[in-house]
Image: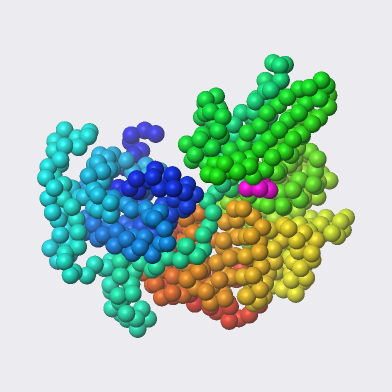
Amino acid sequence: MKLDHLSRKLAVIIHADVVDSTALVRQNEMLAHNRIQSAFKRFSRIIDSYGGATRELRGDALVAEFERASDAVVAALAFQVANREFNLALGDDLRPSLRIGISLGEVIVADHTITGVGVVLAQRLEQLAEADGIIVQGSVSESVPDRIPLEFKSIGERKLKGFNRPVRAFSAALQKNAELPAPEAYSEFRAAAADDFGDASKHRSAGYRPSIEELLEFPDKPAIAVIPFQNLSEDPEQEHFAEGITEDIVAVLSGISDLVVTDRNPALAHAQRTLDVREPGREMGVGYVLEGSVQKSGGRLRITSQLVDTQSGDHLWAERYERKLDDAFAIQDEITREIVIALSVKLTYGEESRTWSEYTSNFQTWKLFQRGMAEQLKFTQEGHDQAMRIAQRIRQLEPDFAMAKVFLGWVLQSGARYGFIKDAGAAVAKAEKLVREVLAEDDRNADAHTLLGYILVNRSQHDEAIAHGRLAIELGPSVATNHATFAVSQFYVGEHAASLTRMKKAIQLTSYPPDWFLAVLGDAYRSSGELEKARVVFEHLALRMPRSLMSLTRLISAYSDLGDAVRARHAAGELMAVSPMFCVSSYMRAMPFKLETDRESLSNTLLSAGLPR
């Protein structure tokens, strides 16, 4: 990128990191990671409420930007107060504490990230802070108005790495017996709507609402490292086979949605110096390691493979394959396919991965199908366009592949539903034609019944949708998508409690629920009156899918339901920036509610946030 394309400006920067994160990870890697991410999410909400913006999350560090020094310092204090309270409520000693540095300096903005001397200075100041402490630059302390009850104590001029001149540094704290200032907009709203909010003390720390993430734990996206398969044969030719199968597995795994595959080069370096795969797995920050071996014996080839949990060292899955050594390339494809399907079942989609694989024996078709699903589940115009190209390619390669028709039907229906296709009516009609062709050949295809149920509920043909949804579950009881899609139909019909129960079942059948599962789960919580749970789910969805209509409309509804007008209006502003032509009436026309009360409830919450009618 050329320098002319970069934007420079003066900004107040927060840099925060977790104190002694390595020690926390050693206690319990997965729990530590979840707790650290929870802390950053809570801090980001507070930053947002004070008019700041979280610009970057890097492992155990956070970078945020503010226009005003006072907002940055108060937001930092608000978080430290809230985080201490949160940690005290935990039942163990795994309690992430942050130290925070705040600077005023020039930054460079590019691709929604910030760099420059201001960021470096904030990081250096943060390193001077104690646990739960805040250190600010002298110019930051001087920029805070006297009316704000903060106390700054000089810690002297400090020589900081990378800076030629000493920097005046101050610790920041709230004055004794003073009340933590709330954001100006929040204060104005609280004064105007005291009856709705009740006791203001319940909303201390910038309206920070006690999180229930401990109750609603969402797994992190599974991450795996593939250790190069070992050649146990005396035949050096099998080295190429071992390398080939490793490369194939990495390539196919990388195309699976919701699975993070690390680069194999560091894995290779680790494999050469250690026999314990937990060590390289933990060092690379992955939860799982796949290792295996290849051995030729006479005219047969034996391949072993096993999946290891890097935290516990437990073997979650292991398999041995023996094949007659006729066609090495055919064997390589076959074994890669079997291994990848097993891992997908174990780490992501659950048993539906195996179900999908049974529709075709063509490995290339199956790989394309996996890639297409990953694109379609992004719910973006670009993802839709790519999924459409892949779906059409699959039909060219294998016209009789039933799932090719079902997959294309999903892409057409989803594209029409979310506005990615101009002629929505024609797209849905084509999707229905395809799925009915599949059912005419095999009326026990559960995936086809699931898609047809979704098409019908979006047409407000509620009874028929419910019937096809029930049949899909009878035919495919272990397939999570069948349960999740049926939960959608139940939600629109008004069977709220049943929808919630069904959606929980769908999530139990997956190791890592796709984004749209969370959207449906939150809808079910909201319609069942469990508003706090709906908020937590929708905030998590917004972290997964920022700047998405799917997440922002739901976030607005959650905040409006809870009377948090400030956050609702902020989310509404984000939505209008993403979709300037958005209006509630057009959005609601696509909502096939059977009950008018459900329609009015959602419409009113969106309108109350200031969205155009």
User: What colouring style does the render use?
Assistant: rainbow
At horizontal 66% and vertical 48% (from top left) the residue drawn is 346
96 relative to 304 in the view: left or right: left
Residue 601: tell me if it is visible.
yes
Magenta-colored segment: predominant secondary structure: helix
Return the residue found at the far bottom.
Answer: 195
Q: Which residues are magenta?
A: 343-347
Q: x and y percent of residue 567 in the render?
A: 39, 67
Residue 239, picture quadrant: top right
- Rendered residue at 37%/53% (across/down): 96
Q: Quadrant of residue 85?
A: bottom left
**Residue at 39% over, 34% down:** 1
Residue 598 against residue 46 in the figure, above or below: below
Residue 594 position in % (x across, y down): 66, 77
Residue drawn at x 86%, y 60% is 443
Was residue 357 drawn as part of the magenta stretch in this picture?
no
* Towards the viewer: 309 or 212: 309
From the top left corner, tell me how far across and down residue 64 is, in percent: 32, 51
Q: Is residue 138 visible?
A: no
Question: Left or right: 21 with respect to 101?
Answer: right
Taking depth in this image into account, of 497 and 305 the one nearest to the observer is 305
